[in-house]
């Protein structure tokens, strides 16, 4: 009798089992919807947390500190000064000197660097024998530390026993005091940047060249175009977005140049006459040698605003190029 009662349709046992299933299904559906909706945010949340802690907060706090008089000896004591640090910065001749040096070194390093990188990428693109070896070799300077590379170049540009002056004397030229001259020191610092970043940009250009359709080269070859003409009329126009990207990144790197001039001259002044002091060295000098953290913060924000202006300028160029095509 008990067995027949539990197996009868509509019995108490059957109703209880159906009720548990009907209550669990909506709950599982809700969990699935919540998982599908909120899981992507949970996956990207660590990035935003780290960015807020180590990117956004230091940026905002530096801007707040730039509006105060802060000493390195007492960093927690702030005296409100408003825009005084910025107005004093605009009246400081050493700031404008550092800005000019940064611009000059940036041009001397960026233009030859990208031209050489484009040429090297073009050579590697045409199935050069041992291309895999050369690709690894191009990344070697990038993998080398800034300190090691700069110290080697400082010895190469030594006034008395440097290899650069030895080579000049071989061809009958007088030796150059590389560190104490304005243009010579800026050229020396720029050569370090060129050596370190040319291979990196060359591999970026090579990857972009490999994405260019082969049909374009075949059509140009059928029309009788030489290798040089194919490079000018096919490769370079196809690489315009990549070239613009490398120009922007190289310009940002040149604006933030710090390690190379610091280690080349061995001081924060960038030479005895500040002849190769960049904005990064000027910031370092104001904050950690003059002990004015408020002024250093103002320099940092001035560099940030300069980078924003450069980014907007390149953005306008990109829009104009896209409209023209």
Image: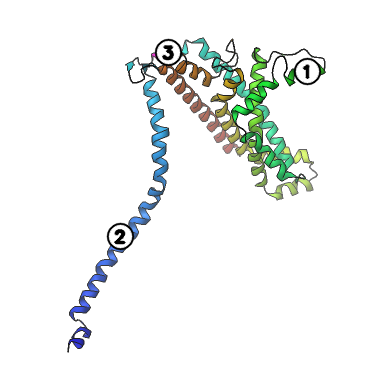
Q: Residues within 10 Å of mark 3 (few under 14, many from 20)?
A: few
* Residue on which disc 3 sits: 87
Front position in the image: 220 or 273: 273
Residue 12 magenta: no
Q: Badge 1 is on which residue?
A: 168
Residue under the image location 55 percent in, 31 percent down: 314
Looking at the rendered structure, the secondary structure element under dot 3 is helix
Asked whether residue 86 is drawn in magenta, I would say: yes
- First reached walking from the N terminus: tag 3 or tag 1: 3
Give the distance between the C-alpha atoms of the residues marked 3 and 1, in whole angstroms.
46 Å
Q: Residue furthest front?
A: 161
Helix, strand or loop under label 1: helix
Nearer to us of marks 2 and 1 is 1
Indicate left or right for 255 with 173 as reference: left
Quadrant position of residue 152: top right
Residue 244, numbered label = none
Q: Residues within 10 Å of mark 1 (few under 14, many from 20)?
A: few
Quadrant assignment, res 135: top right
Q: Earlier in the sequence, mark 2 or mark 3?
A: 2
The quarter of the rendered structure image containing the N terminus is: bottom left
Give how far across and how far down residue 159 sits, in percent: 70, 14
């Amino acid at each position: 009798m008990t067995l027949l009662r539990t197996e009868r349709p509509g019995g108490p046992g059957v109703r209880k089992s159906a009720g548990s299933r009907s209550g669990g299904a909506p709950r599982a559906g809700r969990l699935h919807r919540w998982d599908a909706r909120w899981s992507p945010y949970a996956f990207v949340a660590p990035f935003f947390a780290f960015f807020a802690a180590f990117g956004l907060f230091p940026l905002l706090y530096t801007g707040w500190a730039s509006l105060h008089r802060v000493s390195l000896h007492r960093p927690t004591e702030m005296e409100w000064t408003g825009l005084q640090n910025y107005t004093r910065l605009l009246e400081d001749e050493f700031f404008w000197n550092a800005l000019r040096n940064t611009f000059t070194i940036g041009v001397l390093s960026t233009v030859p660097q990208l031209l050489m990188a484009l040429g090297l990428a073009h050579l590697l693109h045409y199935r050069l024998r041992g291309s895999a070896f050369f690709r690894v070799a191009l990344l070697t300077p990038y993998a080398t530390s800034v300190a090691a590379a700069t110290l080697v170049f400082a010895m190469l540009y030594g006034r008395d026993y440097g290899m650069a002056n030895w080579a000049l004397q071989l061809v009958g030229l007088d030796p150059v005091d590389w560190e104490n001259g304005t243009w010579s020191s800026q050229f020396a610092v720029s050569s370090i940047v060129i050596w370190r970043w040319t291979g990196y940009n060359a591999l970026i250009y090579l990857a972009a060249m490999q994405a260019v359709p082969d049909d374009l080269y075949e059509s140009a070859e059928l029309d009788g175009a030489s290798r040089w003409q194919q490079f000018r009329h096919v490769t370079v126009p196809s690489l315009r977005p990549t070239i613009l990207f490398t120009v922007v990144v190289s310009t940002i790197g040149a604006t933030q140049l710090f390690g190379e001039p610091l280690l080349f001259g061995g001081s924060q002044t960038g030479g005895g006459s500040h002849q190769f002091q960049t904005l990064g060295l000027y910031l370092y000098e104001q904050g950690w040698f003059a002990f004015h953290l408020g002024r250093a913060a103002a320099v940092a924000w001035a560099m940030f605003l300069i980078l924003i202006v450069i980014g907007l300028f390149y953005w306008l160029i990109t829009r104009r190029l896209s409209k023209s095509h």
